[in-house]
Image: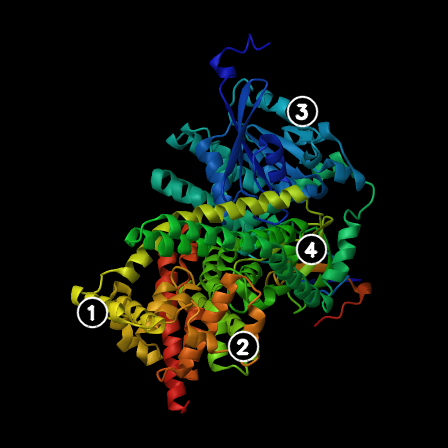
Amino acid sequence: MNKKKTSEEQTRPIVVALAGNPNAGKTSLFNKLTKLRAHVGNYPGVTVEQKWGQLIHHGRTIKVVDLPGIYSLNYYSLDERVARDFILKEHPDLVINVVDSTNLKRNLYLTLQILEMGLPTIVALNMIDMAETSGLKIDIPRLEEGLKARVLPIAATIGRGLDNLLNLIPEVADRSDRAWKPIEISYGQDIDEALDRITTELNSSTIAQTKIPARWLAVKFLESDLMVDNQLQEEAPALWTALNPIRNQLTSHLKTTTNDEPTAVMINRRYGFLAGLKRLAITETHKDTRPVSDALDQILLNRLLAPLFFLAVIYVLYQFTFWASGPVVGWLENFFTLLSELTKNHLPNGRLKDLILEGIINGVGGVLGFTPLIAFMFVGISFLEDSGYMARVTFILDRIFRAFGLHGNSVMALIVGGGIAGGCAIPGVMATRTLRDPKERITTILVTPMMTCGAKLPVFLMLTEAFFPNHQAQIMMGLTVFAWIMALFSAKLLRLFVLHGPPTPFILELPPYRLPTLSGILLHAWERTWGYVKKAGTVIVAVTIILWTMMTFPNLPFQTQSDFDTRLKVANTEKARQDIESELKVAQLQNSLAGRIGTALEPLSLLAGFEWRTNIALVGGFAAKEVILTTMGTAYAMSTSSDPILAEATTPDGKSSTTKAKENKEVEEETLIHNLGHALNQNPTWSPLVTMSLLIFILIYAPCFATIAVIYKEIGLKWAAFSVVANTIYGYIICLIIYQGGLALGF
Amino acid sequence: MSRTIPMRSMVANQSGTINQIKGSGIMGVRIREMGLVPGATIDILGRAPLNDPIHVKLYGNNLTLRNNEADHILVEVDDLTKATER
């Protein structure tokens, strides 16, 4: 049947761009068309990266690109730039403009802008089923006549109209001339005249040699569009100089007649055009299109109940995450334990074995161990996004966060990052993608790692148990509150001095509540989790090896090493032998590169209360925060094995008897926490003040490496480096003040 | 009788018709492009717990915007709705 379709023209692949407002169902259409994984989002701005997939329909390859959800083809936001640049630079064969049929007027505004560019377009009236249920009647032929484009009703989620759409794609793409033909909207006499003059000028210049219609350039020129203005000034300065008076004349004329800028008048006229179109083609039988959702909002957004409900949602999110991920975390731990057992038993002793065991398996295991937690947190977040509740969270909390130069959308990043003790900065950083303003987004990313994430918790537990045994709960709670204060305060500082700028306009849609589909949530969570594993996984191995090397080399001088060897040989009791081994470990660590760095930094760090051993542990904390604990264990010559002396030390509440039944590893960690805490308490250089200073430093200083890697992938090397350097210096200064202030006050 | 007030001073359940948008630059463009143009009718659904942002219905769909933005929007309201102006 394809015999006649042999010409190159009819076999070339068709490139289709999907464009539409956020929430118009673009992504679900994309998924249906390509059967490729892409998230179905109910939250403005879920698709930030360009997603594409392809399919073959009747032997013809169709490439589908999912553009970011946008309200307009302006050049203000990143999403708008991405969408517009794709259309202008890639010249797709056609655009499928996905329109939410239940919200036609606002959605068709973007349609007009696309049609003004003139490239072949199919307007897909999505969610037509819901529109029909709510009593909307759309006269398709009249709408097509008004828009001068093909219009097709579809319902992507239930697959309605998709075959028609697929059949229409080659028909529109192969339209005989394939030229871009813009529709011409009348903007009133004054503007139309100016547009005609500019279009004529442009057509007689070199600028018009591209596919992009001169009329569209003229429209954008009158709107003082940044890109068009700059392009004209650069490529045809003489032309720009000739055109500029036309714009200035119009602007001052409109100022006196309408008291508005050309842009404003033009937007009003587009909406006027749509109002006319609506009268012609659309009949509404009743007005209320979302009774259930609005009734729900009456309760969930009630000024008194909203904060309570929000807290309950966050509580459930955390409970769900820990409940669901708990067993999986256990399996992963067992897997890595098994792996190290195998390595221990089957590899010959030596440096390679140490590297694989202590460096790679422990390091990678430590970071990957968090993956289930992250995955389930993403499941929860995806549910909140797809249901429409996330947009409400933004609405409820925007006022507070704006005071600190952040945005309502920053809330989720901070909460997930550890706003309630036990989160993780990685999903937090990735949750900032919904922030549209780059400055607000960068600020949020930089302060998210300051929250009390799950990896910091065991370190905090150890230190508080050792020095504040009677106020442990209060101090832990206090640290969480302090983390919030620090994050918000730091955000304010960043916005004042580093990322200065006015708040961006906040006009957000609250989409109707929808029951998310299981497959949608799982796909979304899977994509994000896999994204994390890919992003973090690639660098983690490298970094763990580097850190392990730093803490191992150089070797002890030959003489020192042999001294130890001799002492080990003559040691007559097991205890003596273990003491010497611990001493050897400390000597090795102190001699290593990390140890030397720690020692070299001591003059500075002592001012904030940290001695060289703490410094090494903090260096180790780059790999993952819980490494601080194990490194301190080594540096203070603590062994996790059943050392007779240390095993005697029981907690005052008799915890040691209950822990016996627990898993081996947990016992080990708890023993380490307890023994290390005990040792630090006995150590004369440690005091509650030192501990307080250290607690706060760990809270603020450089993010762990997995987070740094994600920051790098999200906003680039510069900010990743900034987060390491600035957070560390900032944390140091704060601890310096706390420690020195504390000393002066006599603590 | 009707009068024109800024959208900021509207209260929950009050409705009106947009009369004028004062904002210029990106702010004015954003407000208008979301459909808040002269002639559009709006219903105030409520406000966030701290009185800001505003929750508003426009063309059957819901939007939120801050008081700062609402300052730029003048709305013609019916006096019968007994708005308590601040």
- Residue A164 placement: quadrant: top right
Residue A563 shows which numbered tag?
Answer: 1
Residue visible at 70% across and 50% down in the picture: B39
Q: Residues within 10 Å of mark 4 (few under 14, many from 20)?
A: many
Residue A296: % across, % down: 76, 56
Q: Residues within 10 Å of mark 2 (few under 14, many from 20)?
A: few
Q: Are the residues under marks 4 and 2 on the same chain? A: no
Outermost residue, front direction?
A572
* Disc 1: host chain: A
Residue A323 on image: x %, y %: 63, 58
User: What residue lies at 62% left-to-right and 36% top-to-bottom?
Assistant: A98
Number of other residues with Cα within 10 Å of mark 1, as a class: few under 14, some 14 to 19, many 20 or more: few
- Give the foreground label among 3 and 2: 2
Q: Is residue A601 visible?
A: yes
**Which residue is disc 3 drawn over?**
A164
- Distance from label 3 to label 1 (Cα)? 84 Å
